[in-house]
Every structure is written in C-alpha cells, then in structure tokens.
Image: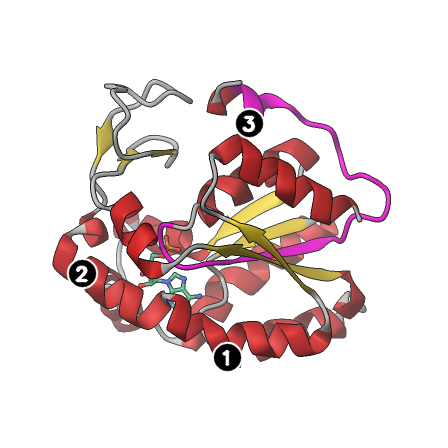
Amino acid sequence: MSFKNILSINLGRPEGMKKVIIFLGPPGSGKGTQAKIIAAKHNYAHISTGDLLRALKDKVPLSAEESDALERVEAGQLVSDELIYALVFDEIETSLARGQGVVLDGAIRNVAQAKAYQKFFEGKQLGDEVIVISVALDDDEALKRISGRRICRQCGAIVPVGSSQVRCPTCGGELRIREDDDPTILKERIRVQGNQALVPILAYYTNLGVVRSVDGGRGIVEVGQAIEKVLEN
Ligand code: AMP
C-alpha cells in the first residue's frame, strides 16, 4: 500500500485509544512519518513543532525571539522552551476543543518540556490520556537514513533515501533536501536530539508508566502496524 493510500484511510478513534499520543525518537527514526499516518488514520491533529517553527519563515514581521529560533533550527540546536509552549499549547487547545485527539511529533525534546506538557494535560484532566510511542533506532542508522532523504516543499511528506521518486508521492509537489539535513548540522541534531538526549525523557515517562517502544528499524508499514497494536491495547 502506498504512503498516499495509508494517509487517506480515516478509521476514527478506536475505543480506549488515548487522546494524547506523543512520539519520541531520534531524528531520522521515522517518527514524523508514523505520527502523520496515525493522525490521518484516526482523525487526530498532527502537531509537529518542527513544522510550526519552519512555518515562521513566512511570517512578517518576526519577533527577535522568532528570528533567533529560526537561526537555531538552521543550526540544529533546540529553540527556547517558552517559544515551543507558545506555538503548541494553543494548537493543542484548539484541537481538543474540536473533540480531536492530538499526535505530538517532536514536541518534547527535554525533561523540562516533558514536565510542562504533563502539567498542561493534567490541568485538563487528561493526565491519564497520555501515551508515549518511542520509535527506537540507533543514531548511526538514523544518520544513514537522513543523509539523502528528501522532503516535499508542498505537504512536508518525507521521501526516503534511495527512492527514485522525482515528485512527492503524496501530493505531486517538488522535492528538496531539508536545510538542517546538511551533514554538519545533522551531527549537531543527533548530539542534542539523539538517543543520549532521549534517555532522561524516556526515564521520566517510563516512571509514569506510559512508554511503549517499537522497533523503528523496519519498513514504514511494519512499524505502523506495531504502533497500531500498542495503541489499541
Ligand atoms: P523536527 O522537524 O522535529 O526535526 O524539528 C526541527 C528543528 O526544530 C529541531 O532540530 C529543533 O531545532 C527545533 N525543534 C523542534 N521541536 C522542538 C522542541 N520541542 N524543542 C526545541 N526545539 C525544537
């Protein structure tokens, strides 16, 4: 089944499925692709902090904080926690108010953020509605996957390395290499967002008993099936 077909299936939310699905994984683990698939399939809002930050490029005028954030994104560094909250909490509120669950993609990059989101969800009586999907992949494999992958200019779909696609398989848009997939910047991203950085975040959520880990080393469909299984149980 093609990625486009996977995205077009909307099955709604199965009974018992948590309302807040948090994806964790190193850059290149495939968490963004899987987050999009799950959101489309169950009509959840897909909230990617990376996408929200990249969208700032089109904003005029930019505040000093926002331009600093864009520079940090281009350098592969984390942006301030405060800006992340300002971008994301409103989005989450809006989706929840519509009765939609949320899939958070890349939204949590350190323990302070994990705690702030948990407090936010507990404040909405959604503390028990959080599940964390950890897409496990070692940093070397993640690096290999990112080097050479392409992104659709139009819809943001990720086209894996080695694919002979000339246009985006989802929307037909033009493909390009993401600026922060440049090898030097990539090293920095893996340093600040790779497996070592994930250890304390995973420890925090493991302590809450909400982490489910899936092997990210398999193909898109197999990883997706593994995620579906853990979400339904
Ligand atoms: P992503 O598209 O998730 O790989 O994110 C792209 C870039 O946005 C990251 O390399 C960071 O510079 C920044 N970013 C995204 N999410 C966060 C976050 N939760 N905290 C801090 N920086 C973030």
Residue 98 appears in the figure: no
Please tell me whether residue 176 belongs to the stretch shown in magenta.
no
Q: Tell me the residue at 27%/20% (across/down).
A: 165
Give the residue number, with chain letter if any, for mark 2.
Answer: 185
Residue at label 3?
A: 7
Taking the spot 48% from the left edge, 75% from the top edge, the residue there is: 199
Mark 2, Cα crowd under 10 Å, few <14 / some 14-19 / many 20+, is some
Callout 2, which amino acid? Ile
Task: Tell me the quarter of the picture where residue 53 sits.
Answer: bottom left
Q: In the picture provided, is 155 more to the left or to the right than 128?
A: left
Task: Provide the residue designation for mark 1.
Answer: 200
- Give how far across and how far down residue 158 sits, in percent: 36, 36
Residue that protrudes farthest toward the right in the picture: 15
**In the shown orientation, is residue 94 left or right of residue 3?**
right
Quick check: which quadrant has ligand 1?
Answer: bottom left
Query: Magenta segment range?
Result: 5-28
Q: How many marks?
A: 3
For label 1, the SS is helix
For mark 3, give the secondary structure. helix
Q: Reading the chain from its start, which is encountered first: label 2 or label 3? A: 3
Q: Magenta-highlighted stretch: main secondary structure?
A: loop
Q: Earlier in the sequence, mark 1 or mark 2?
A: 2
In reply to whether residue 11 is colored magenta, the answer given is: yes
- Answer with left or right where residue 54 lies relative to residue 11: left
Viewer-nearest residue: 144 or 171: 144
Pointer 1 or 3: first along the chain? 3
Q: Residue at x 27, y 53 (%)?
A: 143
**Is residue 155 among what the camera can see?**
yes
Neighbour tally class for label 1: few under 14, some 14-19, many 20 plus, Cα within 10 Å: some
